[in-house]
Amino acid sequence: MESLKSFVFSLASIRLIILGQPLQFISTAAQTNQLTAGSRIIPTQYLTSSSGLFAFGFCNVDPSINPQKLILAIWFDFGASNCSNKTVVWFARDPTSKSAVIATNGSVLILDDSTRLSLVDGQATLWSPSQQFGSTLMLLDSGNLQLIAAGRGGVSWESFHHPTHALLPGQNMTNSSGIYLLSTNTDMDFSAGRFTLIVQDDDNIVMYMRDPNQISSLAGNAGDPYWNSQTWHSGQVPTIVFDDSGNLFYNDSLNGYKNLTAKRPPSSAQSYYHYAALDPDGTVRVYAHQKNITDGIAWEVVSMFPADGCSRMTKYSIQSICGPNAYCKVSSSKGQRINCECPYGYVFLDEQHEYRGCGPNYVPGPLRSIRLYIIIGVLAISFVTSVTYTLWQGYASKKAKRMRLSAGLRTFTQRELKRATKGFKVLLGEGGFGKVYKGEVSYPQPANIAVKKLIKSDEHSERDFENEVQSIGQIHHKNLVRMIGYCKEGAHRMLVFEYMQGGTLADFVFQSERPPWNFLADAAIGIAKGLEYLHEGCKSQIIHCDIKPDNILFDDKHTARITDFGIAKLLGDQKTQHTVTTVAGTVPYVAPEWFGGVGKVNSKVDVYSFGVVLLEMICCKKVTGGQMLNQQGALRDLVNMIESGRAELLVQGESEALADMESGAVYARGNLVLAEGPINQAKDKQGGADVRRHHGSQPSA
């Protein structure tokens, strides 16, 4: 009986196929946004969202090259029936190679009766959402493809939780396993590219250039990213958000909202379609397309990051995007695409992978000509070698010393810096070790620089120069001003730093109008983090010795940065104290042990100076008194006012400041220990413990 039923059913199925009405296939004529259990999609069919904006199916991105090569994808459709020259925003990706799964005209996407979704070709399964089942596959108007398991808790799988190279409005990214953006090889080649954007388990958002030969690794260059959010180990999981207006940002409960790209007006959601993509050149771009116009208007780049072009700086080096014998060039279009090009006489080694470099473009000639070229080449090399060797003898020692100092730094000539500063025209500041001028260079990034021109003269200036190059040149931290180069030419000694356009702490604190308390609190935490890195994060401990408001600068994001290491003492390994013979620093920020004849100083002299700066930030007034005893009396008076409940007199009744006075009192008590004589190590550690209890994971400094 069962065999008879099967036979009848088979005959009915054959009849339906002959009549051109196979029930298991969706109709190509009637557009639908869902696939139900027992149905399938072949390459001539597709799903369309209710609005007609998105389509899902088999996509031949470039039929002129290979009409048989298909990918399973979601694309902006605008009512068209195939995806060529459309914008693909998601595709089925192979979990091992990270490339798009390649289908053929014989491939079929099946949602079988057991509610399993599979892309098959013959007997082979090309792709399937791992261990996920559902009775309905639906394409939403948001562009999100959902596999819905009726009676099993709703959505069992969705494309928004498995992005490939792009994000759509309403799509977020966290550090969940398997969520990352990976660029494609080219706009038309959906094999795995070289660049990734990941929210790591350590809470840091990073961008890596990966080795395409290591298909299993998403991080490249030994974990050395060319961009990161600097939110590692914050204890708060950041989330990348792409909103309906086309704004790309990340947020966490500690730092709030941080824009990754230029902010779009809220009205853009009603006027434009948006998507964001990690493009093949490693840049994230936000694209916009005017609504109600489907012909003649291309997608427009409205914002992008990072915007460092061919000068991508990692923690350790400048990152080269192109291979051997090739050079990097940024296009002049608004999108500023980064391309690799070959010099004259060279061609790409691989036209499909231009980043692999260039080789000579020549056709081998007769053997006699080759021999002639070899002879001429050998003679030329011999001549150049002889001349070079002669010149090298007098230059080798000087060059060796220069190379030791220039690890990771650019060496400038005096003429270059004179031209960059327009003849040392704009004076930014002046200190005991020289003057600082504003300048601008084309390389390396950033373009705006600050040039510290050291005072010429004696051995003292020479020692300071060597000290700064060796100490500052090796450290990188978001709360320290980064050194990017130097000049050591004849009697000229100059250091080149990032230009901080936000001014100094003194510019904010010692004005008639008090700055916001949150601004001061963030600045204090930033200074503490910078000091902690100098004292504990460097290979050899660095003592600043001159912490004061004039040496605290702010960048364009109002991040506090410590500058001026001209009097820093570089301590050797295993040393905790250093003997000094001269007083360094600026009164009234100098610790008592400089004057008390102790002769031994350590990192706590910076902690003392930091305490004085904190009190000035609380009061927004300078600590007066040229004598050390008067200075200590002023500090003691400020501490007494805080501890006796009269803090409102210091902060002029500001409510947020009063709420944080307990923290201020802790800082003041910890530093008063240092003000009462030589360093008391036990009490200082206790003060640091109080600060950590109040601020959680803030630095011990």
Image (cartoon, rainbow, N blue to C red):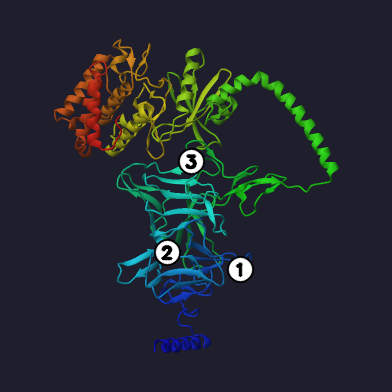
| Image quadrant containing the N terminus | bottom left
- Residue at the spot 30% in from the left edge and 47% down from the top edge: 253
In the image, taking residue 574 as reference, residue 225 lies left or right, namely right
- Residue at the spot 81% in from the left edge and 34% down from the top edge: 376
Which mark is drawn over residue 67? 1
x then y, percent, for residue 695: 25, 36
The three-letter code of the residue at mark 2 reads Pro
x then y, percent, for residue 333: 57, 52
x then y, percent, for residue 335: 53, 52
x then y, percent, for residue 344: 71, 45
Which callout, 3 or 2, points at the residue further toward the start of the chain?
2
Q: Residue furthest right?
A: 368
Which mark is drawn over residue 249? none
Q: Is residue 53 visible?
A: no
Q: Nearer the viewer, mark 1 or mark 3?
A: 3
| Image quadrant containing the C terminus | top left
Label 2 residue SS: loop
The three-letter code of the residue at mark 1 reads Pro
Spatial separation of the CA atoms under disc 3 and disc 2: 31 Å
In the image, taking residue 619 as reference, residue 166 lies left or right, namely right
Which callout, 2 or 1, points at the residue further toward the start of the chain?
1
Q: Which residue is mark 2?
A: 129
Q: Residues within 10 Å of mark 3 (few under 14, many from 20)?
A: few
- Residue at the spot 16% in from the left edge and 28% down from the top edge: 643
On screen, residue 74 above or below 451: below
Q: Which residue is mark 3?
A: 222
The three-letter code of the residue at mark 3 reads Ala
On screen, residue 73 above or below 516: below
